Amino acid sequence: NSFQFEHLNFPSHSQRKCPPPLLLSYNPFRQDCISRLRTRLEHILSSNIPDFDYMLYVVSQERVFTSAVGLDFLPDVKEAMDGLYSCLTTLLASQDSPTFVSWEMGPHGRLRFNITAECLNKLFEIGLSASCVASILQISKSTVHRRMREYNISVSNMYSTLSDDELDTAVRNIKSRFPHAGYRTVKGCLQSEGHRVQWTRVRASMHRVDTAGILSRLSSMGCVVRRKYSVPGPLCMQHIDTNHKLIRYNIVVFGGIDGFSRKIMYLNAASNNRAATAYEFFMDGVRKFGWPYKSVKLYLIERLWRDVWVAVTHLYYDVLHTLEEDGLLDIADCLHLYCVHYTFLPRLKDDLSRFAHGWDHHPIRTEQNMTPNQLWSKRGDQKTLFNCRVNF
């Protein structure tokens, strides 16, 4: 926190040397770059606790940008940027991993890990195993089991006590909203509603409630070949895109998904496709989860759109097309479109929100049946994010 902006030593107008004649045309553009960098750094340092990780990102971005356009900075400015980049890299690389648990002095013997019951309950409630909890807290598995005995925490007691009839009713409600939902989606939706149910009970309930649907999905099941790529950790890469399945009715779905955990950063709908709308939804995700290092459009979010279509948007597509075919909806009439937005848009937003919560709790087969929320919780320390920003 002792870092001061004056350490950057940006030269004043009076201190700057006259540039060579060949660089005179670059002066306005170069001045804009320096002004933008100064403004961004001042904004970061105005915080009570400056975000040096984000500062490194800003400096790196400006260095890459100026190199790409072949812009020649004054030697003092370039030296200040290089020095700041070097200092931030050294500072963040030398930081120790954050301590999730503290130590306390006992009456005798070695120091004791101070792990609260609230911390353990929060991790177990999202379905993490004892070994995963031990890895996150950076302690041994035996220590986790000892604290569970001390706090009388039992994973088996966290499972839902719903009867078979009550479970069938809950599954029917989910299937009424998402008719094509399979085992994993239904289990994720149950988890998002606060019902932690064993796999065997979910399968049995699905067979009682949706036997025809299971047979239909089995008969149409195909082999999907998915490309593989590696992302170091959460927020290192975010996939963003818009879905235009309902564009005929001026309805656009905006979405963003974390490339590491598959956790949905934002999923919402609007009656326009403006950049300001996309920016606002993106910033909603930033306010909830933090800034991503890279935001790109890749195939992973195309896979999400397929599930959004199957679970949510195809229902609205069918209803609106039926209304249009029956002559009850004229898309050339602004009043009709207003009624569509007034009637369907709030319901679509609500269904997308429910889908996102269910998605974040659904087990991923290729990730040892861990959910996006579990993968997100296993993000590790800040070095993971720092290393991914340096290495990408």
Image: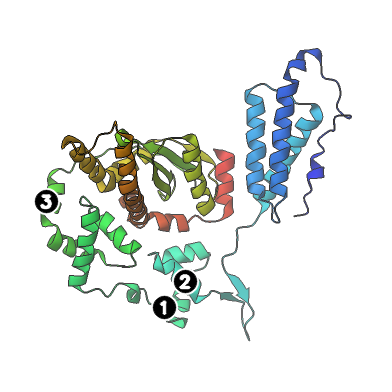
Dot 3 or dot 1: first in sequence order is 1
Image quarter of the N terminus? bottom right
Q: Mark 1 and mark 2: span between their CA atoms?
A: 8 Å
At label 2, counting other C-alpha atoms closer than 10 Å, the crowd grade (few under 14, some 14-19, many 20 or more) is: many
Would you name the residue on which mark 2 appears? 120
Q: On the picture, is 281 further left or further right than 101?
A: left
Q: Nearer the viewer, residue 314 or 107?
A: 314
**Three-letter amino acid code of the residue under disc 3:** Leu
The tag on residue 273 is none
Image quarter of the C terminus? top right
Q: On the picture, is 291 further left or further right than 194?
A: right
Residue 13 percent coordinates (x, y):
85, 29
Q: Secondary structure at mark 3?
A: helix
**Three-letter amino acid code of the residue under disc 1:** Ile
Residue contact at pointers 1 and 2, CB within 8 angstroms: yes
Residue contact at pointers 3 and 2, CB within 8 angstroms: no
Quadrant for residue 230, please give it: top left
Residue 24 percent coordinates (x, y):
77, 16
The mark closer to the camera, 3 or 1, is: 3
- The image shows residue 163, relative to residue 346, as above or below, that is below
Would you name the residue on which mark 3 appears? 215
Q: Nearer the viewer, residue 33 or 385?
A: 33
Q: Residue furthest bottom?
A: 107
The mark closer to the camera, 3 or 2, is: 3
The residue depicted at 52 percent of the width and 56 percent of the height is 380
Would you name the residue on which mark 1 appears? 153
The residue depicted at 63 percent of the width and 47 percent of the height is 53
Residue 309 percent coordinates (x, y):
28, 43
Residue 330 percent coordinates (x, y):
25, 34
On the question of residue 195 being in view, the answer is yes
Q: Mark 3 and mark 1: span between their CA atoms?
A: 40 Å
On the question of residue 246 being in view, the answer is no
